Every structure is written in C-alpha cells, then in structure tokens.
Image: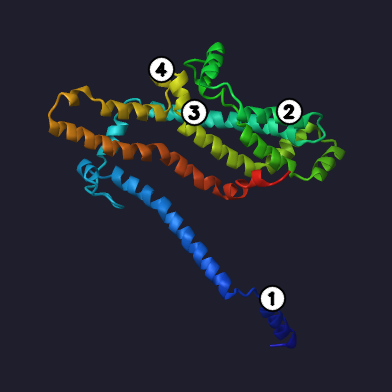
Amino acid sequence: MTAKTVTAAKRAANNTIRISAGDKAYYTVVYSLLGLFTLLIIMPLINVVANSFSSQDAVAFGWVTFWPVDFTFKGYNAVFAYKGIWTAYGNTFFYAIVGTILNLSMTMICAYPLARKSIPGHGFITGLFMFTMFFGGGTIPNYILVRGLGMINSRTSMIIPGAMSVYNMIIARTFINNIPSELEEAAKIDGCSDFKYFFNMVLPLSGTVMAVLALYYAVGHWNDYFTAFLYLKDQEKMPLQMVLRAILIKNSFNTEALASSAQELLYNQSLQDLLKYCFIVVSTLPILVLYPFVKKYFVKGVMIGAVKG
C-alpha cells in the first residue's frame, strides 16, 4: 500500500460522518414511531380485506382479525352479480380519466400566466381566484346554475362544474414560478413564442407537480358521489359510489326480510356486514393500484405549496 493510498484512507476515515449516541437515540425513537403509525394504518386495511373474504357468520360474530375465516367469495359474488356494477365501473373510469385531463389542462393553463410577474394585474386576478376559496354560493345556487346550463342528467355535470381547483392551481403556480427566469430569456432569444415555451419547456419541467395534482383530481373524481346524487337521474350514468350505495340501501331495507322470520333477518344483517367490507375493497382498490406509479413524484411534489415563490 502506497503512502498516497494510506493518506487517502485516513482522509476518508476523518470525513466519515459519526453518529453520536444522542442521534442514535433520536433515530431509534423516530423510526419506532413511524413503524407504529404504519402499523396503525396497515392493520385496519388488512382487517377489511380479511373480512371481505370471510363467511357471513365469521364477520357477524367478529371472529376475523387479520386472516380470512371460512374463506369465501360470497360477498364479492353478491356485489358483482348486480347488473349495473360494470356499467358503474366504466362510468367512474370515464369521469376520473376525462375529468382529470380537463382539470390538469385548466389548472396548468391558468397557473402559467399567473406565475409570470410581467403580466399586468396578475396579483389582482390571483386574489379573485382566492376569493372563491372562501366565499361561494352554496348547493342551491350551484344547482340552479347547472340546470340553467342544461347539464342536469348529463355526464358533463360530473366534469364541468369542478373543472379546476383553485388550491391546486396555486400549487402549480408556485411550482412554475420557481422555474428559473433565465430559461425563459434563453428561449425567447432563440425565437421561442409563449405557446412554444409553455408546451415545450414548462409542461415537461412540471411533470412532478402534474403527477401529484393528477392523483388529487383522480381520487376526488373516484370518490365523488354527491355530485351524481344532485345532478344525475339515469342509472346508466351513475358512478360506482352511487351504485354501491344503492346496493347497500337495497340490502338494508329489504321489504321481504322485514316480513320474514328472525333467523332470516339475522342472515340479511350478516350479509349486509359482509357487503360493507367488500364495498370498501371494490371502491378503493383501483386508487391503491394507481398510487405506486406516482409515489416517486408525490414525495417531491406534496411540499411544493409550502415553497415561497
């Protein structure tokens, strides 16, 4: 071993970060708390999945913990036997995909000009947008507006009224505002127009925030049932949440069961308990599958709104 090698090894040893006993104790406590919180989140999910694959009696008497008891697909068979479930799934995917595309388009188109301080009145316009976050007409004026636009019982009523979230627009605006202005100056010197700069430079650089906002919008569309409850009438246009709600209410208020024996009433009640767990899995599984694909963007993009711009 040469003298240079020994010297380099000593320097590397001296530059090694040494963790003190206090730091080790701190990390131990932090990781223990994170592990505990993770278990608190995961354990109920495992319990829900285990209950959904268990028998009615096991669910009714609380025998299920974290593993199915009397494994069966009876609950899922009852859910998917409902003739409108697949149509509702298609409707929900349509509302989530088309709605998210429209939401992202409107958000980025609005956020880009408001992020440019060279545009006169950008602060005043931003204030007008923020005003709508605190003051709104309410449900009845919104219904009158949607009815006046002729969107009652139309698929557009599930997409157009909530075409943009001001909160998400401010997040996107903050992100775009943090893009170096020298990049725009260089693009303008090369003869790049505003439209070209937006589509060829801003949008590709905004992939992180767009992925995060897409997740926000998609989850909102997927879980939305109140909008359909207000504006839709045809069962063929109902989203998944409304159909699952209808199945549960139908099972809860079964008129034939009300006139039957106590044993049959107990049977229907246990079936209702089983269906509740199946509904949770059926309605949340697509979003749980989607999340890993945007997780790497979510970690960086979730704190964008906290950056002062």
Which mark sits nearer the N-terminus, 4 or 2? 2
Colouring scheme, one of rainbow, by chain, secondary structure, one colour: rainbow
**What amino acid type is highlighted by mark number 3?**
Phe
Q: Residues within 10 Å of mark 2 (few under 14, many from 20)?
A: few
| Mark 2 residue type | Ile
Residue 1 x %, y %: 68, 88
Where residue 185 appears, as percent x and y from the top left, is 84, 41
Q: Is residue 253 above or below residue 280?
A: above
Counting residues from the N terminus, which is met first, the one under dot 3 or under dot 4? 3
Q: Which residue is mark 2?
A: 125
Point 62% across, 47% down: residue: 303
Q: Is residue 67 left or right of residue 22?
A: left
In the image, residue 148 lies at what x, y percent?
Answer: 56, 11
Residue for badge 3? 94
As drawn, 267 above or below 38: above
Pointers 4 and 1 in contact (CB under 8 A)?
Answer: no
Location of mark 1 (residue): 15
Amino acid type, mark 1: Asn
